[in-house]
Every structure is written in C-alpha cells, then in structure tokens.
Image (cartoon, rainbow, N blue to C red):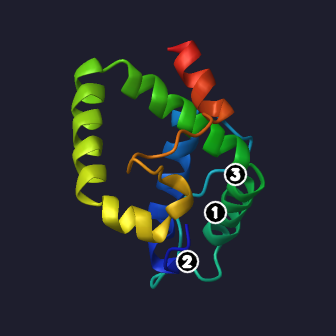
Amino acid sequence: MFWKKSDLDKAYEFIVRTLEEVKLNPSLPIPDFESCEEDYGHFSCECNEIVIQWMSYVSENMDEIDKLIKHSAFQFIFQDRNFLHDFHIELTNFIEREMDYIKFKYPEYVTFKNRLRRQSFPVWLKQAVFLS
C-alpha cells in the first residue's frame, strides 16, 4: 500500500477491491480524484487525507482481513479437485528435487528416511477443510 503519491488512486482502488472481496465495507469518505486540483500527485489535497484513512482502516484490521482472505482462497481452491491433484504432484516433485537443500536448511523438519516430518495443521486450515 505504500504507493507513490501520484498513484494514490491506484492504491485506493486496490484497497476497496480487496475489502469488497472479503465483504468489509467501512463507513469512510470516498475520495473524488476527478475533481482534485492537484496536477502532480496528491501531496496536500483532500484525496490524500481520505486515502490515509482507508490505509489506517486496513492497518487496524489486518488480522481480520488476512483471515478472511485465507478463508476465501481456500474455499475457492478446494472446489477445484483437478487443481489440488496437480498442485500435489508439483509439490511432491519440488520436494524430491530440493530435499538436500531442505535437509541442510531445515533439518528439524526431515526424518531419517528423508521424508518431511508431519506437522499439525493450523486452525485456519482445519476450518477451511471443514467448511468446504
């Protein structure tokens, strides 16, 4: 979100699009970029002040936004069984190719049989699987 001031309208559009996708609709003012009198970016105009409010909202609600994005992504992905199959095959091939590096970098996650050690699933993943 740390865009150049001249791209403030793009930052605002990104924020709004993201919040709409996770169904969060804050009651914040809407900048009027069309009527803005700034010729070389939004350095001291009202648009700047309004977009800062939107950025603050995102910062204050980042944990909730992340949670909703993860949930939405997994809902979408779990509906596509072909994608899951292909992803599993690709992941398996990647792990096999990179096992020496994984053992070197993360030895605590590799068993004596050169397999990845099983890990507990995070709560958000369990919920995504349950809800799909």
Picture coordinates of residue 84, whole percent (x, y): 30, 27
- Which amino acid is tagged 1? Val
- SS category of the residue bearing label 1: helix
Residue 108 can be seen in this image: yes
In the rendered view, tell whether residue 24 sits above or below residue 33.
Answer: above
Please name which of the two marks, 1 or 3, marks the residue nearer to the observer. 3
Single out the residue that lies furthest toward the right.
60
Residue shown at the point (29%, 44%) measured from the top left: 91
Quadrant (top left/top right/bottom left/bottom right) for the N terminus:
bottom right
Please name the residue that numbered disc 1 is placed on. 51
User: Which one is earlier in the sequence, the residue at label 1 or at label 3?
Assistant: 1
Residue 33 can be seen in this image: no
- SS category of the residue bearing label 2: loop
Q: CA distance from mark 1 to mark 3?
A: 16 Å
- Compared across the picture, whether 85 is left or right of 65 comes to left
**Marks 1 and 2: in contact by CB < 8 Å?**
yes
Picture coordinates of residue 53, whole percent (x, y): 73, 60
Q: CA distance from mark 2 to mark 1?
A: 10 Å
In the rendered view, tell whether residue 66 sits above or below residue 36.
Answer: above
Residue shown at the point (27%, 36%) measured from the top left: 87
Please name the residue that numbered disc 3 is placed on. 62
Q: CA distance from mark 2 to mark 3?
A: 25 Å
User: Which one is earlier in the sequence, the residue at label 2 or at label 3?
Assistant: 2
Report the disc number at residue 42. 2
User: Which one is earlier in the sequence, the residue at label 2 or at label 1?
Assistant: 2
- Which amino acid is tagged 2? His
Picture coordinates of residue 122, whole percent (x, y): 64, 36
Single out the residue that lies furthest toward the front.
112
